[in-house]
């Protein structure tokens, strides 16, 4: 159990658990739940997105601004979500309105900026069901609801009353919502596969400190730009409101390796064009397509010839944490089977 004040607005992760009951009776930032089986989990108030991935045979009680599931099977979810629920590669799911509470729950929902009456628990968008057959999920009949869960051990008034199907006016966000799964990224990478023509170059910043991002899109573009030109990047952009950060270390392998050193040669990488940046409706995730120029050059003292530059197109997913730091979390090359998790 996590009690009020234990999390106090921080991000939280749950992973690799079996047959366990867990409850967070506090407000939090982004929540990630990965690889849990046979568990019962209560999330009191998540101020941004809750991600549930690779889970089976679980019962979830989730209050959040947005709920996203990937490869979740045979599970029941009691949900308070202010935007539609997104699922990918999932099946055997049952959805019902949030059904529980604890003392201070209402205060935590208010702190997390969650309106308990704006609950789209019934509005599920399945990225793998083009025919809208609803074969991977269903709405749980009220007669099958479990007893309300009061994880503090004492029954109290519901801070999130049950919302009836269709009673909430929905802001249509489907067109702006991206699928951030690996398969979708592969498909997108193939659509924008590398061109043999030289795209117009972008200027490279002389130093990280000289670049200021005025908004989320600018911050994302700078992360992409410096990511493409180096393999050891720490803080990239810092301003009063936004900080852009890329991950450290070598980030790709095989044909797409950055800073790859060969016998007598070295690979020089440079961003040629960042063709698109899409920010999620909650401004906590971003999706980008960009092309990198990769040129093998002879090292000093080598008489090897310099071949022409090649161009590789990538898709990337970025996330923004509670401190407003943008990070690349997944990148996919157009070249098949070249994937890196960071």
Image (cartoon, rainbow, N blue to C red):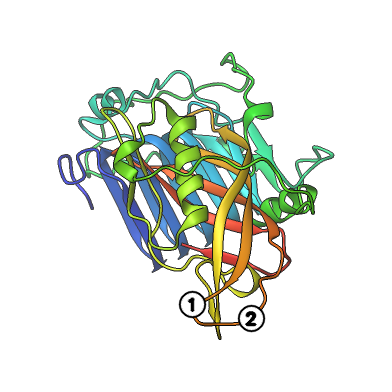
Q: Which residue is mark 1?
A: 300
In this rendering, would 234 be left or right of 253? left
Residue 314's disc is none
Q: Nearer the viewer, residue 251 or 339?
A: 251
Can residue 243 be seen here? Answer: yes
In this rendering, would 284 be left or right of 8? right
Residue positioned 68% across, 45% down in the render: 137
Position of residue 251 relative to residue 103, above or below, is below
Which percent across, then down, holds residue 165? 61, 23
- Res 86 quadrant in image: top right
Can residue 45 be seen here? Answer: no
Q: Which residue is mark 2?
A: 304
Which percent across, then down, holds residue 319? 45, 44
Q: Nearer the viewer, residue 24 or 28?
A: 28
Q: Residue furthest bottom?
A: 263
Count every numbered label the image shows and give the total.
2
Q: CA distance from mark 1 to mark 2?
A: 10 Å
Which percent across, then down, holds residue 64? 42, 34
In this rendering, would 260 be left or right of 115? right
The secondary element bearing badge 1 is classed as loop
* Label 2 packing within 10 angstroms: few (<14), some (14-19), many (20+): few
In this rendering, would 259 be left or right of 86? left
Which percent across, then down, holds residue 197? 78, 49
* Label 1 packing within 10 angstroms: few (<14), some (14-19), many (20+): few
């Amino acid at each position: 159990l996590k009690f009020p004040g234990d999390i106090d607005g921080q991000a939280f992760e749950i992973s690799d658990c079996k047959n366990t009951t867990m409850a967070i009776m506090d407000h939090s930032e982004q929540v990630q739940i990965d690889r849990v089986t046979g568990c019962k989990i209560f999330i009191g108030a998540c101020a941004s997105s809750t991600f549930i991935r690779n889970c089976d045979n679980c019962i979830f009680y989730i209050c959040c601004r947005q709920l996203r599931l990937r490869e979740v099977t045979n599970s029941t979810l009691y949900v308070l979500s202010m935007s539609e629920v997104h699922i990918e590669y999932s099946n055997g799911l049952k959805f019902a309105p949030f059904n529980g509470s604890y003392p201070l729950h209402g205060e935590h929902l208010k702190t997390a900026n969650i309106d308990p009456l704006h609950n789209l628990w019934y509005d599920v968008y399945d990225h793998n069901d083009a025919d809208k057959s609803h074969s991977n999920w269903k709405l749980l009949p009220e007669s099958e609801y479990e007893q309300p869960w009061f994880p503090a051990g004492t029954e109290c008034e519901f801070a999130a009353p049950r919302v009836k199907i269709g009673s909430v006016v929905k802001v249509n966000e489907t067109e702006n919502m991206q699928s951030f799964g690996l398969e979708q990224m592969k498909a997108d990478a193939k659509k924008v596969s590398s061109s043999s023509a030289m795209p117009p170059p972008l200027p490279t910043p002389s130093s990280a400190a000289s670049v200021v991002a005025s908004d989320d899109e600018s911050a994302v573009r700078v992360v992409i730009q410096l990511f493409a030109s180096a393999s050891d990047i720490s803080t990239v952009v810092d301003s009063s409101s936004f900080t852009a950060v890329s991950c450290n270390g070598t980030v790709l392998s095989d044909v797409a390796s950055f800073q790859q050193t060969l016998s007598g040669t070295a690979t020089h990488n440079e961003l040629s064009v960042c063709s698109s940046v899409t920010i999620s409706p909650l401004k906590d995730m971003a999706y980008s397509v960009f092309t990198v120029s990769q040129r093998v050059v002879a090292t000093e003292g080598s008489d090897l010839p310099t071949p022409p530059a090649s161009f590789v197109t990538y898709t990337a997913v970025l996330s923004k944490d509670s401190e407003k730091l943008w990070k690349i979390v997944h990148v996919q090359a157009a070249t098949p089977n070249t994937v890196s998790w960071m």
